[in-house]
Amino acid sequence: MDILDLREYLLSLPRAEETTPFDDSTIVYKIAGKWFVVADVDDLSHVVIHHPVERGIELRDEWREIGPAWHFNKRYWSSVRLDGDLPEEVLRRLIYDSYIFTIHHNVTPKALREELLREAAILSENYLEK
């Protein structure tokens, strides 16, 4: 997946935002102001994803392309190498799961969280099939 495909997929998620809070090359993708994916357009060898603690352990055991993310809380964030054998559909699933996890655990108020989850559920099949 190249940077344009990655960007298109991330911005296709309901209400996902693309921000550059640090510099022009570090892109932070947010939902309701909360981070769920970080990418560096100058070095797209990996992306950083947000996940539950248990899921991070499973992913790191299952895929050699997934490891702890530098400069992040390694319990909740993993670095996913894009230059390995990780199938694109797995990457899409990881991104979508990160998006949903972030909504569930970081978005407030509850009414907004429930609204975002409804929007994501209605369209979830589209995000995983593209």
Image (cartoon, rainbow, N blue to C red):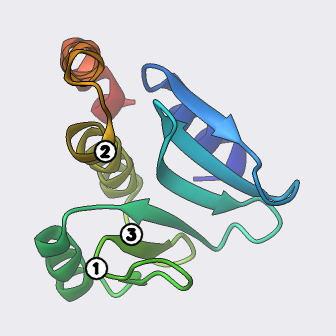
Q: Nearer the viewer, mark 1 or mark 2?
A: 2
Q: Residue sitting at 39 percent across and 69 percent down?
A: 86
Mark 1 or mark 3, earlier in chain:
1
Q: Residues within 10 Å of mark 1 (few under 14, many from 20)?
A: some
Q: Position of residue 75 (x, y in %)?
A: 28, 79
Q: Residue sitting at 52 percent across and 40 percent down?
A: 30
* Residue 40 sits in quarter: bottom right
- The answer to whether 45 appears left or right of 70 in the picture is right
Mark 3 or mark 2, earlier in chain:
3
- The answer to whether 45 appears left or right of 121 in the picture is right
Return the residue at label 1.
75
Q: Residues within 10 Å of mark 3 (few under 14, many from 20)?
A: some
Element type at mark 2 = helix
Residue nearer the viewer, 14 or 92:
14
Return the residue at label 2.
106
Element type at mark 1 = loop
Return the residue at label 3.
86
Q: Is residue 8 above or below residue 87?
A: above
Element type at mark 3 = loop
Q: Are marks 3 and 2 in contact (CB under 8 Å)?
A: no
